[in-house]
Image: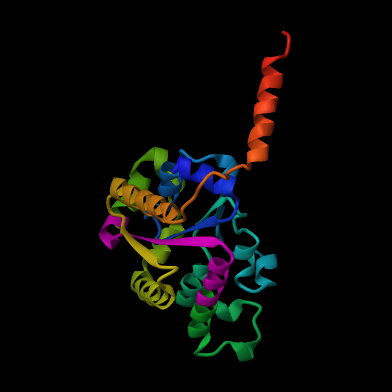
Amino acid sequence: MAELQDMLYAQDKYSLLIILQAMDTAGKDGIIKHVMKGLNPQGTKVHSFKQPSAEDLDHDYLWRANINLPERGQIGIFNRSYYEEVLVVRVHDLVRTQQIPKELISGDIWKNRYRQIRDYEQYLGENGTVIIKIFLHISKEEQKNRLLERIEDKSKNWKFSAADIKERGFWDDYEKAYEEAISETSSNKSPWYIVPANKKWYARLVVSEIIIKTMEQLDLKFPEISKEQTKSLEDYKQKLLGEKT
């Protein structure tokens, strides 16, 4: 992966956007920490999508994603993403508290957002941004075990949030929202990968393989230099070798 990243950076044509979505405790942070640890930090950017700020809410919902997209030659990682706008916003009906004209909030709003997301991802793809969308699928029982571990292990107490327990109460609603969002926004050029996440080591292995295979399909290469540049390099080499020390 590190070698492919070097070529991605040197070629400076594509950018790679990795989107991680999951229920709480599914291992998004662990994926970022373990799978990406061999990458060059200068070519990697991680952005976590938390509760939107007042500034975020004064823009369209894709705005904060757009300003955090990776540059050409870079790898961007979204810990959660604009998909929260058809997940948590839908489950808790938060759209009615956002700064959106009432006449635009109708029964079709979610279908409209799916279409907007499909169009947005198609636009990014047609401009050189390759998107990898990963849903880490954890069972409700395994989430329970991980929450209990955070409570019982003092070194993990800081990870525990009462909000996780509250959100767990909406498990069925989230399952339905995820199922529909994934079905509506998965395409040949921008597919969703559903990765079993009950075993952390397995999820990390699968995600790393997905990233590597996607990058290999880009036919990345180090830029070739012209004959004139090759001759110049040889001249510079001889000049350096001829220096007196």
Where residue 86 appears, x then y in whole percent?
48, 74
Lateral position of residue 54 relative to residue 200, left or right: right
Quadrant including the N terminus: top left
Where residue 11 appears, x then y in whole percent?
57, 49
The answer to whether 181 is drawn above or below residue 7 in the figure is below
Where residue 138 appears, x then y in whole percent?
31, 59
**Stretch of the chain drawn in magenta:** 118-143
Identify the image quadrant of residue 49. Answer: bottom right
The answer to whether 91 is drawn above or below residue 219 in the figure is below
Where residue 227 appears, x then y in whole percent?
63, 40
Q: Is residue 129 magenta?
A: yes
Q: Nearer the viewer, residue 202 or 198?
A: 202
Identify the image quadrant of residue 197. Answer: bottom left
Q: Nearer the viewer, residue 73 or 141?
A: 73
Lateral position of residue 163 relative to residue 179, left or right: right
Identify the image quadrant of residue 234. Answer: top right
Q: Nearer the viewer, residue 41 or 233?
A: 233
The residue sitting at 50% across, 45% down in the picture is 5
The residue sitting at 28% across, 56% down in the picture is 142
Q: Nearer the viewer, residue 240 or 218?
A: 240
Q: Residue furthest right?
A: 244
Q: Is residue 127 magenta?
A: yes
Colour convention: rainbow
Quadrant including the C terminus: top right
